[in-house]
Image (cartoon, grey):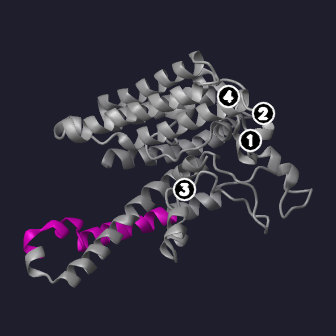
Amino acid sequence: QVNFVMCQLLALAMAFFFRLYLHPRAASERVRHGLATLLGSYFAIFCFGWYATHFFVQVIASYAIIVLVDTRNVHKYTFIFAMGYLTVCQISRVYIFTSGVFSTDFSGPMMVMTQKITSLAFEIHDGMIKEDQDLTVEQRRLASRRLPTLLQFLSFNLNFLSILAGPSSSFKDYTAFIEGSHYKGWERSGACGRENGPLHEPSPAAAVTSKLLMVLLSLVFYLTLSKAFPVSLNADEAFIASAPLHARLCYLYVSCQGGRPKYYFAWTLADAINNAAGFGFNGYDKNGRSKWDLVSNLNIWNIETATSFKMFIDNWNIQTALWLKR
């Protein structure tokens, strides 16, 4: 956990550097792709040691499948391999290597990579095999009309912005960010539906600042609640024997709620890192303010005020839900 936080804080600093000094106007796509890949690979090795080998194996093997397999079946073979490899790794970690260095949980980054790899395979199939009239509006927007280069594929899956905590994103959105073309369509349509919108590149400063404040609040809440109401007490035999059922149920609810800010911390920090690099712009709201929620993975306010289970899941792990829907 310490390594994770250290790497994410370093990633935040590098994200600002990436946007300010390696802007698409100042650096080539190859340089941006290359640096993003190298930093992400370093973070993976630093946090997971030799287990990072699984990331590289999954990515390289998946790229070989995408390039070599008939495009008509590329989505099937890629999905089977990526999901199969993830499943084998997870089963081995949980049921075979249950202690020591072999028990390190590296499944989180692999799940995000699996989402990215399988999504791209389907986007390639949509763009190179299917007719436009057979696709939904969203599928047409994300469809990939050509195969990615190896560097693009490595950068998409191993970049330092999302290697540790995600979130998942589409290949087209990511490459548009690297190329610097992710603002152009919105510049033409402008804010508030007017034709003459702002011509300057929107700044993520306000979005990053607000998200970092939420990160700090989440950390404080998590440390406070997890210390006051440790989840482990739910399995304590003395507590079970002495506390009445209604007290145990209340404690179970409160202690589980106390674990939620941990995810708020990790996902909001990951979102802020992407935004700091310039990734995540999603147009303008009705008041002309820029939105930076393209790769957001949760909406904390909607989660905490949810009035139904559907409202809760619609705002929790958003990118995974989008992957399942697509």
> Residue lying furthest right in this view?
195
Which of labels 4 and 3 is toward the front?
A: 3
Q: Is mark 1 on a helix, strand or loop?
A: loop
Q: Which of 184 and 317 is in front in this view?
A: 317
Q: Nearer the viewer, residue 219 or 99?
A: 99
Task: Give the residue displayed 48% in from the left and 37% down from the top.
Answer: 113
Circle 1 sits on which residue?
135
Circle 4 sits on which residue?
29
Report x, y in % for residue 46. 35, 35
Q: Is mark 4 on a helix, strand or loop?
A: helix
Q: In 3D space, how far apart are the residues under numbered discs 3 and 2 (Cα atoms)?
A: 28 Å
Q: Do the residues labelled 4 and 3 touch (CB within 8 Å)?
A: no
> Residue lying furthest top in this view?
68
Q: Judge whether residue 234 is colored magenta.
A: yes
Circle 3 sits on which residue?
318
Report x, y in % for residue 291. 69, 59
Crowd band around label 4 with a 10 angstrom C-alpha radius: few (<14), some (14–19), many (20+): some
Q: Label 3 sits on what residue type?
A: Ile
Q: In 3D space, how far apart are the residues under numbered discs 4 and 3 (Cα atoms)?
A: 28 Å
